[in-house]
C-alpha cells in the first residue's frame, strides 16, 4: 500500500495518474476506520451536519481519515480527467434506519464526485459473494455493505454488484468485528 498521508507519496501518485502510458485501472481502498459504524461507540465527532467531524474535538483517527478522504477524492478526479479507471472501495450504507455512522461518501470531497453524471455507485453486499469468517457454519455470512465508486459503466456494474439473497435458514448474517 501507499501511505497517502505523506506529501511525497501524494505527489508521486498524482504524477503517475497523469502519465499517458501509465496504469489505467487504479483500485483504492482508503482507511475506513474513522467512518466506521464502530465510531458511534468510540465517541466519533462526525455528524450529518459535520461529516468531516467537529474541528474542536476531532479525534486523531478522524484527522487522518479526512486527509486520506480528501486526497483519494483528488486522485480519483485526476484519474477520471486523465481517462483512467479509478475504483474506490469503502463502507456503504446498510438498510437499517439510524444505524449508519457518517461515511466517507458524505464528506465535502466525495459528495460532489457522487453527483457527477459520469460516476456510479456499485452497491455490494459481501454476503452476496458468500464471504464468511473462518470457522463459520455453512449458512453464516458477513453482511458488510460496501460501495465501489467508479466511472459509469453499466456492464461492469452488473458484473460487480452483489446483493444479499435474503435471510433464511440457509443464509444468516454474522457481525463483522472491528
Image (spheres, rainbow, N blue to C red):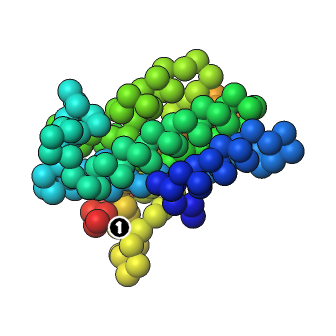
In the rendered image, which residue does mark 1 sit on?
Answer: 140
Neighbourhood count class around disc 1 (C-alpha, 10 Å): few under 14, some 14–19, many 20 upward:
many
Is residue 61 among the parts visible in the rendering? yes
The residue depicted at 66 percent of the width and 51 percent of the height is 12
Q: Quadrant of the C terminus?
A: bottom left
Judge from the rendering whether residue 149 lies leftward or rightward of residue 80; answer left or right: left
50, 37: nearer the viewer:
50
101, 123: nearer the viewer:
101
Residue 37: x percent and y percent?
Answer: 24, 50
The residue depicted at 75 percent of the width and 38 percent of the height is 18
The residue depicted at 65 percent of the width and 43 percent of the height is 14
Q: Is residue 120 above or below residue 145?
A: above
The residue depicted at 74 percent of the width and 32 percent of the height is 82
Q: Is residue 176 above or below residue 104?
A: below
Q: Secondary structure at mark 1?
A: strand
Q: Quadrant of the N terminus?
A: bottom right
Judge from the rendering whether residue 175 lies leftward or rightward of residue 85; answer left or right: left
Is residue 124 among the parts visible in the rendering? no
Residue 24: x percent and y percent?
Answer: 76, 44
Amino acid at each position: 500500500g501507499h501511505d497517502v498521508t505523506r506529501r511525497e507519496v501524494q505527489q508521486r501518485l498524482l504524477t503517475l495518474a497523469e502519465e499517458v502510458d501509465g496504469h489505467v485501472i487504479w483500485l483504492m481502498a482508503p482507511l475506513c476506520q474513522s467512518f466506521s459504524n464502530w465510531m458511534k461507540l468510540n465517541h466519533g465527532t462526525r455528524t450529518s451536519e459535520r461529516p468531516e467531524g467537529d474541528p474542536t474535538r476531532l479525534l486523531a483517527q478522524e484527522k487522518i481519515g479526512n486527509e486520506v478522504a480528501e486526497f483519494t477524492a483528488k486522485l480519483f478526479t485526476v484519474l477520471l480527467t486523465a481517462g483512467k479507471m479509478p475504483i474506490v472501495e469503502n463502507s456503504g450504507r446498510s438498510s437499517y434506519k439510524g444505524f449508519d455512522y457518517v461515511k466517507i461518501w458524505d464528506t465535502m470531497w466525495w459528495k460532489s464526485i457522487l453527483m457527477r453524471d459520469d460516476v456510479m455507485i456499485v452497491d455490494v453486499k459481501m454476503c452476496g459473494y458468500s464471504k464468511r469468517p473462518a470457522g463459520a457454519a455453512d449458512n453464516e455470512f458477513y453482511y458488510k455493505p460496501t460501495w465501489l465508486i467508479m466511472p459509469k459503466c453499466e456492464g461492469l456494474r452488473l458484473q460487480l454488484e452483489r446483493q444479499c439473497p435474503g435471510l433464511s435458514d440457509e443464509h444468516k448474517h454474522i457481525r463483522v468485528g472491528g
